[in-house]
Image (cartoon, rainbow, N blue to C red):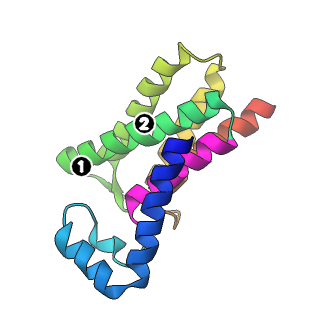
Amino acid sequence: MVLIGSIALFFLVLDIIRLFSKRINIFFFDTLKDFYKSKEYRKFSSITLFLIAGFLTILLFDMNIAALAVSFMIFGYFFSKFFGIQFGRTRIFKKTLEGSLAHFNACIISGYILLHFLSFPLYIYLTGVMVATISEALPLGVDDNFSVALLSASSMYVFYLF
């Protein structure tokens, strides 16, 4: 927790400084062109949101739920990005169907592997997979780097209670 929290805090402070200083922001975008997306010029970076979401998920939820949700965020994001860029042809919302299918499959596989180490009901895990995939694909107005882990963990927690 200390490690991920420290890293998340570092990137958060860096983003706040960058967003308050136009000169520093321009410097970051000129120097680190591959690190930032153009849409992040006036927003928090994806890596900052990713790290904060991971930290909050681990902090707020049971370790079984957090482990699954964070794995959905990590593997789902990686595979949806790769397959969406490489093979994405069918647009749905602002994403591709191929990227969303890759996200779903990555969540299924990573979660299935983790289930061997966690004592967790299958239907709750499948609920988390569905919510992670849907929250990645839908234009919710919140960056999916932030929403996937928190929404999938929340849904698993609600089903876990009942």
Q: As shown in the figure, which amino acid type bears the numbered disc 2?
A: Phe
Magenta residues, start to end: 44-60
**Distance from the alpha carbon under mark 1 to that under mark 2:** 14 Å
Sequence-wise, the earlier of marks 1 and 2 is: 1
Q: Position of residue 53 (x, y in %)?
A: 54, 51
**Whether residue 144 can be seen here:** no
Q: Tell which residue pokes out farthest to the top in this image.
A: 116
Q: Secondary structure at mark 1?
A: loop
Label 1 crowd bin: few (<14), some (14–19), many (20+), radius 10 Å: some
Q: Nearer the viewer, residue 156 or 19?
A: 19
Query: Left of 29 or right of it: where is 151?
Result: right
Residue at (38% x, 76% y) in the render: 18
Residue lying at the far bottom of the rendered structure:
22
Looking at the image, is 20 positioned above or below residue 83? below
Residue under pointer 1: 88
Q: Position of residue 2 (x, y in %)?
A: 55, 43
Q: Quick check: is 47 in the magenta stretch?
A: yes
Query: Quarter holding the N terminus?
Result: top right
x 18%, y 70%: residue: 31
- The amino acid type found where label 1 is placed reads Gly
In the displayed structure, would residue 58 be above or below residue 49? above
